[in-house]
Image: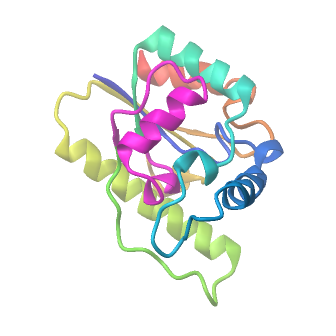
Amino acid sequence: MKVLFLDNDGVICLSNNWGGRDKKRINFLKNNPEFSEKTGKIPVHFIFDDFDKKAVKVLNEIIEETDCEIVVSSDWRLHANLEELREYYTDQGIIKPPIATTGRMEFFDPEGYDLYTWKGWLARIRCTEIREWLKLNEGVEKWCAVDDLNMGREGLENFVLTPSSREGIKKTGAKEKIINFLR
């Protein structure tokens, strides 16, 4: 099996789409006055930003060329279960929904820490979660992790950085690097 560990924000959900989730949530609440956030859960389509259409196209090309499976390593896994993520990915045009999510390590309270320290901590945690998933799941012959957090600094092999939140997976050369890790 070939596995692509995929972050969402900054990889396939790009900064030009950020903020849409707030509008979606407000519209949902406005159109459903009987709904109470205390007793119900807002449907996942109203809590996430849309994926960038060109980034989805690139991801689909990677999936078609490598026949990889997606494992969600994004924090989005903390706000939706696997079935909800599968449905969201499909609705956003991704041709193969995720098969799993990475586990969740102890969460960090960023209060009192600067953004650089917080991002470094999050990258270390995400690396550990990916390594743990690989340990627990036999049969992975090839894998690649794609993220806008620099997990390469944490020694994660098979890693592709997408440092620009405007480009994400569309960044020149990113697709080729991912495919090379999955071949």
- Judged from this view, the residue extending furthest toward the top is 65
Residue 125 appears in which quarter of the rendering? bottom left
Q: Is residue 158 visible?
A: no
Q: Is residue 44 left or right of residue 133?
A: right
| Quadrant housing the C terminus | top left
Query: Residue 99 colored magenta?
Result: yes
Q: Camera-side residue: 16 or 168?
A: 16
Residue at image point 49% right, 17% down: 63
Instruction: Tell me if residue 97 is in the magenta stretch.
Output: yes
User: Is residue 102 rendered to the left or right of residue 39?
Assistant: left
Along the line of sight, which residue is nearer the eye, 37 or 89?
37
Q: Which residues are magenta?
A: 72-100
Q: Where is the N terminus found, in terms of image quarters?
A: top left
Residue at the location (81% across, 41% down)? 166
Tell me what residue is drawn at x 27 percent, y 24 percent: 141
Q: In the image, residue 70 lies at what x, y percent?
A: 42, 31
